[in-house]
Image: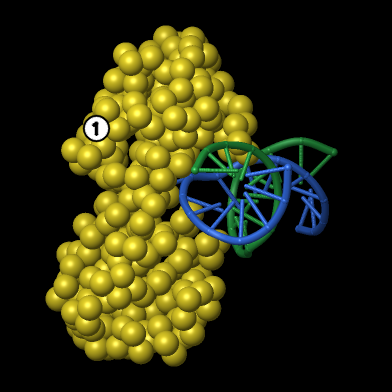
Chain colours: A yellow, B green, C blue
Amino acid sequence: MPELPEVEHVVRALRGAITGRRIVTTELRLARIAPDASAAQFRRKLRGALIKNVSRRGKYILIELDNDRVLLTHLRMTGKFVSLTIDQILPSHAHVVFYLDDDRRLVFCDMRQFGRMIVVAKSKLATTRQLSELAPEPLSDDFSLEYLRAILARSHRSLKQLLLDQTKVLGLGNIYAAEALFLARISPFAVASKVSKQRALRLHEAIRKILSEAIEGGSTLRIDLQEETSSYIGTSERFWRVYEREGEPCVRCGTRIRRTVQGGRSTYFCSRCQRT
DNA sequence: ACCCTCACCTGCACGC
DNA sequence: TGCGTGCAGGTGAGGG
């Protein structure tokens, strides 16, 4: 599920659902979700805290508390939040339960158990390992064409791999990296340092377009109305131009979309539209 | 410093 | 039906 746009949707939904609530108590049911704290420490750091705001840095969710701490959450592959009343039964893979003062429970579910939570002092937020190395927000002015060109010039990796590196370009995952490269009409195998100025410009525009389109829910967004998934906070499904479309015709030229493995991950591309 | 590979998990689709 | 295989949108440890 979650690359930057999906995380942004989760953040917006969470903000509406839990801002102003107080955390009465917390149940950490699977220790590896919060590896830096015991269940008791985790509960203690959050007990009684008022949720002031919910925000995002890259794919990290920041739940800001009034006790000078921030609950950092990364959904990784399958993490989800769901809001339940006190008498609804817990879904499967419910690993963390936050009991709120409105008699609801905010539940973190994660089938693959890859998701992570950490409570950080607000004063240490900027220097915390998870956040300190991240590239600039891709939709902010800091992610300028000049920044991207500098990053490209310094790297001899393939573009696809570079785009997945959160310390270089923030927010893309396997899907949006493929989609951005398709939009920019550049091969995922192109060597970063050899990308021309014009292609760098196209890539810069494509990254911003693919992310903002997904966030603002342009024509390609359709909300999944299925009962089960719509109860999860911030869930949606989309139409992809190349991702998971192996063998189907390219939306630009009709050539069959190809899939190959690059760095151990699937890469989808049009071999005609995306020449180096 | 940089970059690659693999491990971390469960579930699901597929072929035999 | 049942079993084995491969694959899944993310990261970070470990090693070259």
Relative to A57, is A29 on the left or the right? right
Which secondary structure, mark 1? Answer: loop
Residue nearest the observer in this picture, B1 or C8:
B1
**Residue A249 visible, this angle:** no
Which amino acid lies under the numbered mark 1 shown in the image of this protein?
A: Ser
Residue nearest the observer in this picture, A35 or C5:
A35
Q: Residue at x 47, y 34 (%)?
A: A162
Relative to A46, is A140 on the left or the right? left
Does residue A187 sit above or below A78 in this rendering? above
Q: Which residue is drawn at 22% across and 82% down?
A: A67
Q: Position of residue B4 (x, y in %)?
A: 64, 38
Label 1: chain letter: A
Residue at the disc numbered 1: A144
On the image, which quarter does residue A148 sit in? top left
Residue nearest the observer in this picture, A55 or A134:
A134
Q: Position of residue A128 (x, y in %)?
A: 37, 65
Does residue A60 sit above or below A90 in this rendering? above
